Image: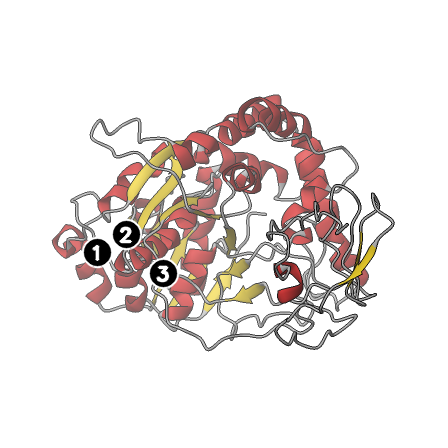
Amino acid sequence: SRPIWTSSCVCRSPPGLNCSCMTIGLEAADGSCDAWAGANGATLRSDSVIVDVRSSDIEALPPPILPPSPPIRRKTRRWVRNSTQSARVPVALPQLSIAILVVGTHGDVLPFVSLAKALQAKGHRVRIATHATHRRLVLAYGVEHYPIAGNPVQLSQWMVESGGTVVGEVLHFHPSKLTMLNEIVRSLWPAVTGKDPFDFDAKPFIADAIIANPPCIGHVHVAEALGVPLHMMFPQPWVTTKSFPHPMSGLRQDQPGAELNALSYSVADEAFWLGNAQALNSWRRSELHLPVIQIGTLGGNITERFHVPFSFMWSPAFVPKPADWGEHVEVVGSFQPPSSDSATSGFAKFDPAAYAELSAWLRRRGPPVIFVGFGSMVISDVAKISLMIVEAAKLANVRLLVQSNWSVLTTAEPSGGLCFDIGPCPHDWLLPQVSAVVHHGGAGTTAAGLRAGKPTLVCPFF
Protein backbone atom coordinates (compact mmCIF):
# COMPACT_ATOMS: atom_id res chain seq x y z
CA SER A 1 0.00 0.00 0.00
CA ARG A 2 1.09 3.60 -0.61
CA PRO A 3 2.24 5.41 2.54
CA ILE A 4 0.00 8.15 3.74
CA TRP A 5 1.77 11.55 3.85
CA THR A 6 0.94 13.05 7.20
CA SER A 7 3.71 15.55 7.87
CA SER A 8 3.98 19.13 6.75
CA CYS A 9 6.65 21.86 6.91
CA VAL A 10 6.52 24.44 9.66
CA CYS A 11 6.07 27.01 6.91
CA ARG A 12 2.58 25.46 6.50
CA SER A 13 3.05 24.34 2.87
CA PRO A 14 0.33 21.79 1.92
CA PRO A 15 1.51 18.17 1.47
CA GLY A 16 2.77 17.40 -2.00
CA LEU A 17 3.77 20.96 -2.83
CA ASN A 18 7.17 22.52 -2.95
CA CYS A 19 8.29 23.75 0.46
CA SER A 20 8.42 27.52 0.46
CA CYS A 21 11.36 27.34 2.82
CA MET A 22 13.40 25.64 0.14
CA THR A 23 12.04 28.04 -2.44
CA ILE A 24 13.68 30.99 -0.66
CA GLY A 25 16.93 29.06 -0.30
CA LEU A 26 17.13 28.31 3.42
CA GLU A 27 18.66 24.85 2.86
CA ALA A 28 20.68 23.16 5.57
CA ALA A 29 24.26 22.17 5.00
CA ASP A 30 23.29 18.63 3.84
CA GLY A 31 20.70 19.90 1.35
CA SER A 32 17.61 19.21 3.45
CA CYS A 33 15.16 21.81 4.68
CA ASP A 34 15.76 22.66 8.33
CA ALA A 35 12.18 23.75 8.74
CA TRP A 36 10.58 20.69 7.14
CA ALA A 37 9.87 18.33 10.02
CA GLY A 38 6.62 16.46 10.47
CA ALA A 39 4.96 15.26 13.56
CA ASN A 40 5.88 11.68 12.57
CA GLY A 41 9.48 12.49 11.80
CA ALA A 42 9.32 12.41 7.98
CA THR A 43 12.06 14.40 6.22
CA LEU A 44 12.58 15.50 2.64
CA ARG A 45 16.16 14.72 1.75
CA SER A 46 18.33 15.71 -1.16
CA ASP A 47 17.81 12.30 -2.82
CA SER A 48 14.07 13.08 -3.01
CA VAL A 49 13.09 10.02 -0.95
CA ILE A 50 10.39 10.27 1.67
CA VAL A 51 10.56 7.81 4.54
CA ASP A 52 7.44 7.17 6.59
CA VAL A 53 8.57 5.82 9.96
CA ARG A 54 5.21 4.09 10.34
CA SER A 55 5.69 1.97 7.21
CA SER A 56 8.50 -0.15 5.85
CA ASP A 57 7.59 0.82 2.33
CA ILE A 58 9.83 3.27 0.56
CA GLU A 59 8.48 5.15 -2.38
CA ALA A 60 10.57 7.09 -4.78
CA LEU A 61 8.81 10.19 -5.86
CA PRO A 62 9.66 12.30 -8.83
CA PRO A 63 11.97 15.11 -7.77
CA PRO A 64 10.17 18.35 -6.95
CA ILE A 65 10.46 21.14 -9.46
CA LEU A 66 12.17 23.99 -7.67
CA PRO A 67 13.13 27.38 -9.00
CA PRO A 68 16.88 27.92 -9.13
CA SER A 69 18.07 29.12 -5.75
CA PRO A 70 20.84 31.69 -5.39
CA PRO A 71 24.27 30.33 -4.54
CA ILE A 72 24.86 29.93 -0.85
CA ARG A 73 27.59 32.13 0.55
CA ARG A 74 28.84 30.54 3.67
CA LYS A 75 30.44 32.41 6.54
CA THR A 76 29.29 35.76 5.18
CA ARG A 77 29.36 38.70 7.61
CA ARG A 78 26.28 40.84 7.29
CA TRP A 79 27.37 43.86 9.35
CA VAL A 80 29.09 46.97 8.06
CA ARG A 81 32.79 46.99 8.87
CA ASN A 82 33.57 50.58 7.89
CA SER A 83 31.33 53.50 8.73
CA THR A 84 30.32 55.83 5.95
CA GLN A 85 29.00 59.37 5.92
CA SER A 86 26.29 60.57 3.62
CA ALA A 87 26.36 63.93 1.93
CA ARG A 88 25.71 66.76 4.33
CA VAL A 89 22.23 68.19 4.22
CA PRO A 90 21.61 71.60 5.81
CA VAL A 91 19.17 71.14 8.68
CA ALA A 92 17.89 74.15 10.57
CA LEU A 93 18.58 74.09 14.31
CA PRO A 94 15.24 73.90 16.14
CA GLN A 95 14.24 76.64 18.50
CA LEU A 96 15.60 75.79 21.94
CA SER A 97 14.98 76.89 25.50
CA ILE A 98 18.43 77.74 26.83
CA ALA A 99 19.26 78.40 30.48
CA ILE A 100 22.41 80.42 31.29
CA LEU A 101 23.51 79.87 34.90
CA VAL A 102 25.78 82.60 36.27
CA VAL A 103 27.13 83.11 39.78
CA GLY A 104 29.11 86.32 40.25
CA THR A 105 29.20 90.07 40.03
CA HIS A 106 27.83 92.59 37.55
CA GLY A 107 30.92 92.11 35.39
CA ASP A 108 30.35 88.35 35.33
CA VAL A 109 26.73 88.67 34.23
CA LEU A 110 26.95 91.43 31.61
CA PRO A 111 28.89 89.41 28.95
CA PHE A 112 26.26 86.68 29.13
CA VAL A 113 23.59 89.28 28.41
CA SER A 114 25.30 89.81 25.05
CA LEU A 115 25.36 86.05 24.47
CA ALA A 116 21.67 85.82 25.34
CA LYS A 117 20.82 88.58 22.86
CA ALA A 118 22.77 86.78 20.12
CA LEU A 119 20.92 83.53 20.82
CA GLN A 120 17.59 85.35 20.84
CA ALA A 121 18.43 86.76 17.41
CA LYS A 122 18.67 83.16 16.16
CA GLY A 123 15.18 82.39 17.42
CA HIS A 124 15.93 80.71 20.75
CA ARG A 125 14.27 81.36 24.08
CA VAL A 126 16.95 82.33 26.60
CA ARG A 127 16.83 82.68 30.36
CA ILE A 128 19.66 84.02 32.52
CA ALA A 129 19.50 82.49 35.99
CA THR A 130 21.54 84.62 38.34
CA HIS A 131 21.22 86.49 41.64
CA ALA A 132 18.20 88.70 42.24
CA THR A 133 20.62 91.66 42.52
CA HIS A 134 21.11 91.51 38.75
CA ARG A 135 17.44 91.15 37.81
CA ARG A 136 16.95 94.73 36.62
CA LEU A 137 20.13 94.53 34.55
CA VAL A 138 19.02 91.37 32.74
CA LEU A 139 15.43 92.50 32.17
CA ALA A 140 16.62 95.89 30.91
CA TYR A 141 17.97 94.21 27.77
CA GLY A 142 14.86 92.16 27.11
CA VAL A 143 16.19 88.84 28.45
CA GLU A 144 14.27 86.54 30.78
CA HIS A 145 15.59 86.25 34.34
CA TYR A 146 15.29 83.62 37.02
CA PRO A 147 16.47 84.46 40.57
CA ILE A 148 18.91 81.99 42.09
CA ALA A 149 20.09 82.20 45.68
CA GLY A 150 23.24 83.88 46.93
CA ASN A 151 24.42 87.40 47.68
CA PRO A 152 27.14 88.46 45.19
CA VAL A 153 28.30 91.29 47.49
CA GLN A 154 28.98 88.81 50.29
CA LEU A 155 30.62 86.37 47.89
CA SER A 156 32.94 89.13 46.65
CA GLN A 157 33.83 90.11 50.20
CA TRP A 158 34.69 86.51 51.10
CA MET A 159 36.86 86.26 47.99
CA VAL A 160 38.84 89.36 48.92
CA GLU A 161 39.29 88.10 52.49
CA SER A 162 40.60 84.72 51.32
CA GLY A 163 42.91 86.24 48.74
CA GLY A 164 41.21 84.17 46.06
CA THR A 165 43.20 81.00 46.85
CA VAL A 166 42.27 77.51 48.00
CA VAL A 167 44.53 77.87 51.05
CA GLY A 168 42.91 81.22 51.87
CA GLU A 169 39.47 79.64 51.64
CA VAL A 170 40.50 77.08 54.25
CA LEU A 171 42.11 79.66 56.54
CA HIS A 172 39.10 82.00 56.31
CA PHE A 173 36.41 79.36 56.60
CA HIS A 174 32.88 80.61 57.31
CA PRO A 175 30.06 78.14 58.05
CA SER A 176 27.70 80.67 56.49
CA LYS A 177 29.62 80.32 53.23
CA LEU A 178 28.71 76.62 52.95
CA THR A 179 25.12 77.52 53.80
CA MET A 180 24.98 80.07 50.97
CA LEU A 181 26.61 77.69 48.48
CA ASN A 182 24.08 75.02 49.41
CA GLU A 183 21.25 77.50 48.83
CA ILE A 184 22.68 78.40 45.43
CA VAL A 185 22.93 74.73 44.44
CA ARG A 186 19.36 73.92 45.49
CA SER A 187 18.03 76.88 43.51
CA LEU A 188 19.47 75.54 40.24
CA TRP A 189 16.89 72.83 39.58
CA PRO A 190 13.92 75.23 39.51
CA ALA A 191 16.14 77.62 37.52
CA VAL A 192 16.17 75.14 34.62
CA THR A 193 12.65 73.72 35.05
CA GLY A 194 10.44 76.29 36.77
CA LYS A 195 8.51 79.46 36.02
CA ASP A 196 9.83 82.87 37.04
CA PRO A 197 8.40 83.32 40.56
CA PHE A 198 8.38 87.11 40.20
CA ASP A 199 6.41 87.13 36.93
CA PHE A 200 2.81 85.95 37.26
CA ASP A 201 2.44 85.86 33.48
CA ALA A 202 5.61 83.81 32.93
CA LYS A 203 5.40 80.82 30.60
CA PRO A 204 6.54 77.35 31.68
CA PHE A 205 10.22 76.69 31.07
CA ILE A 206 12.28 73.51 30.74
CA ALA A 207 15.83 73.88 29.46
CA ASP A 208 16.88 72.08 26.28
CA ALA A 209 20.49 73.14 26.84
CA ILE A 210 22.49 74.72 29.66
CA ILE A 211 25.34 77.23 29.62
CA ALA A 212 27.12 77.89 32.91
CA ASN A 213 30.18 79.42 34.53
CA PRO A 214 32.27 77.27 36.93
CA PRO A 215 31.42 79.13 40.18
CA CYS A 216 27.85 77.94 39.63
CA ILE A 217 28.57 74.54 41.16
CA GLY A 218 25.76 72.13 40.41
CA HIS A 219 25.63 72.86 36.67
CA VAL A 220 26.69 69.37 35.56
CA HIS A 221 24.27 67.72 37.97
CA VAL A 222 21.14 69.49 36.70
CA ALA A 223 22.26 68.81 33.12
CA GLU A 224 22.60 65.12 34.01
CA ALA A 225 19.16 65.07 35.64
CA LEU A 226 17.54 66.69 32.60
CA GLY A 227 19.61 64.75 30.08
CA VAL A 228 20.52 67.91 28.14
CA PRO A 229 23.82 69.30 26.80
CA LEU A 230 26.04 71.47 29.02
CA HIS A 231 28.50 74.10 27.76
CA MET A 232 30.90 75.79 30.17
CA MET A 233 32.09 79.38 29.66
CA PHE A 234 34.46 81.51 31.73
CA PRO A 235 36.97 84.37 31.34
CA GLN A 236 39.58 82.61 33.52
CA PRO A 237 41.46 79.33 32.86
CA TRP A 238 39.65 76.40 34.46
CA VAL A 239 40.87 73.36 32.46
CA THR A 240 44.10 71.51 33.23
CA THR A 241 47.16 72.81 31.42
CA LYS A 242 50.90 73.04 31.96
CA SER A 243 51.02 76.56 30.55
CA PHE A 244 49.74 78.34 33.67
CA PRO A 245 48.34 77.35 37.08
CA HIS A 246 44.78 77.40 38.32
CA PRO A 247 43.80 81.00 39.18
CA MET A 248 42.98 79.98 42.77
CA SER A 249 46.12 77.91 43.34
CA GLY A 250 48.25 80.76 44.68
CA LEU A 251 51.13 79.76 42.38
CA ARG A 252 53.12 82.35 40.47
CA GLN A 253 51.82 83.06 36.99
CA ASP A 254 55.25 83.78 35.47
CA GLN A 255 56.76 80.33 36.05
CA PRO A 256 57.52 78.19 32.97
CA GLY A 257 55.18 75.35 32.12
CA ALA A 258 55.50 72.50 34.59
CA GLU A 259 53.67 69.51 36.02
CA LEU A 260 52.93 71.61 39.08
CA ASN A 261 50.72 73.88 36.99
CA ALA A 262 48.68 70.93 35.76
CA LEU A 263 48.46 69.45 39.24
CA SER A 264 47.06 72.70 40.62
CA TYR A 265 43.80 72.19 38.69
CA SER A 266 43.18 68.75 40.19
CA VAL A 267 43.96 70.05 43.69
CA ALA A 268 41.58 73.00 43.33
CA ASP A 269 38.79 70.89 41.82
CA GLU A 270 39.02 68.24 44.52
CA ALA A 271 39.17 70.85 47.28
CA PHE A 272 35.91 72.37 46.07
CA TRP A 273 34.36 68.92 45.68
CA LEU A 274 35.35 67.65 49.13
CA GLY A 275 34.08 70.84 50.76
CA ASN A 276 30.67 70.46 49.14
CA ALA A 277 30.37 66.72 48.47
CA GLN A 278 27.94 65.99 51.28
CA ALA A 279 25.56 68.78 50.28
CA LEU A 280 25.81 67.91 46.58
CA ASN A 281 25.19 64.21 47.13
CA SER A 282 22.23 64.92 49.40
CA TRP A 283 20.77 67.17 46.73
CA ARG A 284 21.44 64.63 43.95
CA ARG A 285 19.67 61.90 45.89
CA SER A 286 16.71 63.81 47.33
CA GLU A 287 15.81 66.30 44.59
CA LEU A 288 17.48 65.19 41.34
CA HIS A 289 16.94 61.45 42.02
CA LEU A 290 20.48 60.67 40.87
CA PRO A 291 22.96 58.25 42.44
CA VAL A 292 25.50 59.71 44.82
CA ILE A 293 29.09 60.27 43.71
CA GLN A 294 31.47 58.29 45.88
CA ILE A 295 34.21 60.11 47.74
CA GLY A 296 37.61 59.44 46.17
CA THR A 297 36.28 59.18 42.61
CA LEU A 298 37.49 62.63 41.50
CA GLY A 299 34.00 64.07 41.72
CA GLY A 300 35.35 67.57 41.27
CA ASN A 301 36.78 66.73 37.85
CA ILE A 302 33.60 65.53 36.14
CA THR A 303 33.49 68.15 33.40
CA GLU A 304 37.07 67.40 32.34
CA ARG A 305 36.75 63.63 32.48
CA PHE A 306 33.67 63.70 30.27
CA HIS A 307 35.06 66.40 27.94
CA VAL A 308 32.25 68.86 28.52
CA PRO A 309 32.68 71.66 25.94
CA PHE A 310 34.40 74.71 27.39
CA SER A 311 34.71 78.18 25.82
CA PHE A 312 37.15 80.63 27.37
CA MET A 313 36.13 84.25 27.02
CA TRP A 314 39.33 86.08 26.17
CA SER A 315 41.07 86.96 22.94
CA PRO A 316 43.48 84.33 21.56
CA ALA A 317 45.68 87.25 20.55
CA PHE A 318 45.92 88.09 24.26
CA VAL A 319 46.50 84.54 25.58
CA PRO A 320 46.58 81.79 22.91
CA LYS A 321 45.00 78.40 23.49
CA PRO A 322 47.51 76.08 25.23
CA ALA A 323 48.69 73.13 23.16
CA ASP A 324 47.53 70.59 25.77
CA TRP A 325 43.87 71.61 25.65
CA GLY A 326 41.68 69.24 23.66
CA GLU A 327 39.32 69.87 20.78
CA HIS A 328 36.41 70.37 23.18
CA VAL A 329 38.11 73.50 24.56
CA GLU A 330 38.26 76.76 22.62
CA VAL A 331 39.41 80.33 23.23
CA VAL A 332 36.58 82.26 21.60
CA GLY A 333 37.33 85.89 22.46
CA SER A 334 35.79 88.27 24.96
CA PHE A 335 32.04 88.86 24.89
CA GLN A 336 31.52 92.52 24.23
CA PRO A 337 28.85 93.89 26.59
CA PRO A 338 25.69 95.24 24.98
CA SER A 339 26.09 98.80 23.81
CA SER A 340 25.13 101.52 26.27
CA ASP A 341 22.20 102.66 24.10
CA SER A 342 20.68 99.21 23.41
CA ALA A 343 18.84 98.79 26.71
CA THR A 344 15.07 98.64 26.48
CA SER A 345 14.33 100.07 29.93
CA GLY A 346 15.35 103.17 31.83
CA PHE A 347 17.45 101.26 34.36
CA ALA A 348 20.29 100.53 31.93
CA LYS A 349 19.46 102.94 29.12
CA PHE A 350 22.30 105.44 28.77
CA ASP A 351 21.60 109.16 28.86
CA PRO A 352 24.69 111.33 28.21
CA ALA A 353 22.90 114.36 29.68
CA ALA A 354 23.19 112.73 33.12
CA TYR A 355 26.98 113.00 32.80
CA ALA A 356 27.18 116.62 31.66
CA GLU A 357 29.38 117.63 34.61
CA LEU A 358 31.76 114.75 33.92
CA SER A 359 31.93 115.65 30.23
CA ALA A 360 32.88 119.21 31.14
CA TRP A 361 35.60 117.97 33.51
CA LEU A 362 37.02 115.69 30.83
CA ARG A 363 37.15 118.55 28.29
CA ARG A 364 38.87 120.89 30.72
CA ARG A 365 42.49 121.64 29.96
CA GLY A 366 44.97 120.11 32.31
CA PRO A 367 46.96 116.95 32.98
CA PRO A 368 45.91 113.74 31.20
CA VAL A 369 43.03 111.76 32.66
CA ILE A 370 43.55 108.21 33.94
CA PHE A 371 40.64 105.94 34.82
CA VAL A 372 40.77 104.18 38.21
CA GLY A 373 38.11 101.59 39.03
CA PHE A 374 37.92 98.45 41.12
CA GLY A 375 34.66 97.05 39.86
CA SER A 376 32.67 94.93 42.26
CA MET A 377 35.45 94.44 44.78
CA VAL A 378 34.35 94.89 48.38
CA ILE A 379 37.09 96.99 50.02
CA SER A 380 37.36 96.81 53.79
CA ASP A 381 39.15 100.16 54.29
CA VAL A 382 37.80 102.56 51.67
CA ALA A 383 39.26 105.64 53.44
CA LYS A 384 42.79 104.26 53.14
CA ILE A 385 42.39 103.42 49.44
CA SER A 386 40.82 106.83 48.74
CA LEU A 387 43.75 108.64 50.39
CA MET A 388 46.22 106.51 48.43
CA ILE A 389 44.53 107.47 45.15
CA VAL A 390 44.63 111.19 46.00
CA GLU A 391 48.33 111.03 46.89
CA ALA A 392 49.08 109.16 43.67
CA ALA A 393 47.34 111.86 41.60
CA LYS A 394 49.41 114.58 43.24
CA LEU A 395 52.71 112.72 42.93
CA ALA A 396 52.15 111.84 39.28
CA ASN A 397 50.53 115.20 38.39
CA VAL A 398 47.64 113.54 36.59
CA ARG A 399 43.89 113.73 36.84
CA LEU A 400 42.12 110.59 38.03
CA LEU A 401 38.60 109.56 37.12
CA VAL A 402 37.63 107.30 40.05
CA GLN A 403 34.69 104.95 39.63
CA SER A 404 32.93 103.39 42.62
CA ASN A 405 30.59 100.42 42.66
CA TRP A 406 29.95 98.28 45.76
CA SER A 407 32.66 100.17 47.66
CA VAL A 408 32.27 103.95 47.57
CA LEU A 409 35.54 105.85 47.15
CA THR A 410 35.69 109.58 48.00
CA THR A 411 38.53 111.43 46.29
CA ALA A 412 37.21 114.57 44.57
CA GLU A 413 37.13 116.97 47.53
CA PRO A 414 40.49 116.08 49.17
CA SER A 415 42.28 116.14 45.81
CA GLY A 416 41.49 119.75 45.03
CA GLY A 417 39.98 118.97 41.66
CA LEU A 418 42.55 116.43 40.46
CA CYS A 419 40.07 113.56 40.99
CA PHE A 420 36.49 113.14 39.87
CA ASP A 421 34.18 110.56 41.50
CA ILE A 422 31.52 108.73 39.52
CA GLY A 423 29.29 105.70 40.02
CA PRO A 424 28.20 103.12 37.47
CA CYS A 425 28.88 104.29 33.92
CA PRO A 426 29.13 102.33 30.65
CA HIS A 427 32.75 101.67 29.74
CA ASP A 428 32.14 101.75 26.01
CA TRP A 429 31.36 105.47 26.37
CA LEU A 430 33.77 106.33 29.19
CA LEU A 431 37.12 104.62 28.49
CA PRO A 432 37.71 106.05 24.99
CA GLN A 433 37.87 109.50 26.65
CA VAL A 434 40.75 108.70 29.04
CA SER A 435 44.48 108.20 28.52
CA ALA A 436 45.03 104.98 30.52
CA VAL A 437 43.18 102.49 32.71
CA VAL A 438 44.02 101.28 36.23
CA HIS A 439 41.75 98.56 37.61
CA HIS A 440 41.43 95.36 39.65
CA GLY A 441 41.89 92.96 36.75
CA GLY A 442 38.28 92.00 36.17
CA ALA A 443 37.71 90.33 32.81
CA GLY A 444 35.12 92.88 31.69
CA THR A 445 37.20 95.94 32.58
CA THR A 446 40.32 94.38 31.07
CA ALA A 447 38.55 93.68 27.80
CA ALA A 448 36.97 97.16 27.73
CA GLY A 449 40.33 98.88 28.26
CA LEU A 450 42.03 96.84 25.56
CA ARG A 451 39.11 97.35 23.20
CA ALA A 452 39.48 101.11 23.70
CA GLY A 453 43.19 100.79 22.95
CA LYS A 454 44.32 102.19 26.29
CA PRO A 455 47.43 101.27 28.34
CA THR A 456 46.30 99.09 31.25
CA LEU A 457 47.73 98.61 34.77
CA VAL A 458 46.23 95.89 36.95
CA CYS A 459 46.18 96.31 40.75
CA PRO A 460 44.74 92.96 41.93
CA PHE A 461 42.95 92.50 45.25
CA PHE A 462 43.60 88.76 45.17
Locate residue 375 relative to residue 6 in the image: left or right.
Answer: left
Please tell me whether mark 2 sits on a helix, a strand or a loop.
loop
Residue at 38% across, 45% down = 106
Residue at 70% across, 34% down = 293
Q: Residue furthest front?
A: 1
Q: Position of residue 143 (x, y in %)?
A: 27, 46
Q: How is the image coloured?
A: secondary structure
Residue designated by label 1: 358
Residue at 48% across, 41% down = 384
Amino acid type at circle 1 is Leu
Residue designated by label 2: 425
- Which picture quadrant has residue 145? top left
Circles 1 and 2, Cβ within 8 Å, touching? The answer is: yes
Compared with residue 246, is residue 170 higher up or lower down, i.e. above or below?
above
Circles 2 and 3, Cβ within 8 Å, touching? The answer is: no
Q: Of label 3 and label 1, which has the lower sequence position?
A: 3
Mark 2 or 3, which is nearer the eye? 3
Real-space Cα distance between discs 1 and 2? 11 Å
Circles 3 and 1, Cβ within 8 Å, touching? The answer is: no
**Numbered mark located on residue 278 in the image:** none
- Which picture quadrant has residue 451? bottom left
Amino acid type at circle 3 is Leu
Of residues 417 and 304, which is closer to you in this image?
Answer: 304
Q: Of label 1 and label 2, which has the lower sequence position?
A: 1
Q: Do we see residue 380 in this rendering?
A: no
Locate residue 135 relative to residue 222 in the image: left or right.
Answer: left
Q: Of label 2 and label 3, which has the lower sequence position?
A: 3
Please tell me whether mark 1 sits on a helix, a strand or a loop.
helix
Real-space Cα distance between discs 3 and 1? 47 Å
Mark 3: give few (<14), some (14-19) or many (20+) Cα within 10 Å.
Answer: few
**Numbered mark located on residue 93 in the image:** 3
Compared with residue 220, is residue 399 higher up or lower down, i.e. above or below?
below
